[in-house]
Image (tube, rainbow, N blue to C red):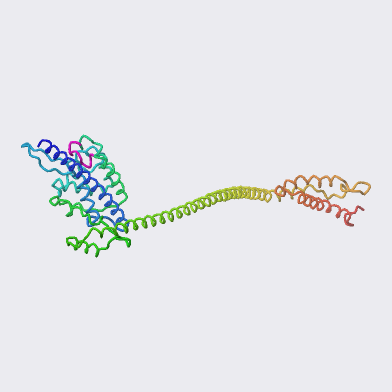
Amino acid sequence: MASLSLGLNLSRKKNISRNAAVERKNLITVCRFSVKTLIDRSCFETIDDSAPEFVNFASILEHILSHRLKGQITWFGYESPRSFWDYIRVACSKMPHSCICSIENMENVSSSRAKGRAWIRVALMEKRLSEYITAALRDFKTTRRFYDDGAIVLGEEANMLAGMLLGLNAIDFSFCLKGEGLDGTFPAVIDYTPYLKFTQSSDSISSDEEELRTLGSSGSESSSPENIGPPFIMDENSWYNKCKRVEQKYRLALEQKGYLEELVRLREAQLLDSVSQNKLVLKRIEDTELNHKLEKEQLEYIIVELQDQLKSFQSLGPLSADASFSQISFDPGQSQDGNGKHDDSHLSLGKEDTPSLLGLCGSLTSVASYKSLTSLKSSEYLASPTTEMTSPGLTPS
């Protein structure tokens, strides 16, 4: 009897551990599917309390955080049920800028379960749900105090849970913290039907009609074991065909992958060439702009200098002309010597006017212009006295 009871105890423990492992695996898998459906739904519209994907996700997360949660021991030794909010409130109390105090002070939320549901919504709107879960799991003493052995938060699945919830930070949630979802009187129920999918291929062994026929004739005496042979052969052939199709799809995907990689390499080479050409064009534009700027500055300087020289020429022009005319003497006695030749003193005066003319032509930097102007002035100044001296009216008697 002792060995029988020992065997029963061992089998019971194995069943308990197996059931706990299966339960943890199911909850984590369903949670991963729920996160994926939420991300897919967020691409088309904003997630709020009315979205069935969110309602299911909140129920799954509540079951995960409540998995093997210890009860609260009263003074009389009785164990009262406890909500996961009690654990979150203690484990996340030291987080900076947390919403724990604000949720504790909410007036319309009284029960512990309702506060936990409000915390899930606020953490999602803050995009910090994964951060809260990670901070709570780091406090191992508090986690160990609130949960029994075999809980999800005490196993390896806890790290997977924090990683899965990190993808929810990319979703914009909008919740009303006064809605019906915060009612703590009703337990959370998970809907598994969105995650259960069965597609029957054309190579399936049996169709729905054959299954119904098999179920209907399973209790009759006419059923014989010989009918089991062909399905196994068909099953083997179907698996072979499936493997062939998978292999073809793999080869096709491999060829497409090679083509896309080659295309990416070609585009990268073209991009590098375009970048180098763009740099050369930008360098040329900078050089051209610099040359244009220098030429503009030089032209502006030349214009200013010419304007100054023009002003000085206009102010000094009349004064130099009067001075040149006052220095010329038209006296016949002094213009000719006793031999009737002209005196060269007047020519020297005309030659002395050349430096003054050079000063008046400050802006005329051309040598040809200077020579023409000098010859013009000297010819005018020398022609006048000569003409007057050779005229009959000025000839001495």
Q: Quadrant of residue 243?
A: bottom left
- Camera-side residue: 171 or 153? 153
Asked whether, in this view, residue 350 is left or right of residue 294, the answer is: right
x%, y% of residue 385?
84, 52
Q: How many marks?
A: 0
* Residue interval drawn in magenta: 144-154
View extreme (right): residue: 339
- Camera-side residue: 23 or 362? 23
Asked whether, in this view, residue 386 is left or right of residue 299, the answer is: right
View extreme (left): residue: 76
Asked whether, in this view, residue 306 is left or right of residue 4, the answer is: right
Q: Quadrant of the N terminus?
A: top left
Q: Quadrant of residue 216?
A: bottom left
- Camera-side residue: 185 or 228? 228
x%, y% of residue 349?
81, 45
Asked whether, in this view, residue 266 is left or right of residue 305, the answer is: left
x%, y% of residue 303?
64, 50
Instruction: Name the residue: 76% across, 44% down.
Output: 355
Is residue 149 highlighted in magenta? Answer: yes
- Camera-side residue: 28 or 246? 246
x%, y% of residue 102?
20, 44
Instruction: Name the residue: 28% across, 52% down.
Output: 33
View extreme (top): residue: 141
Instruction: Name the residue: 88% across, 56% down.
Output: 391
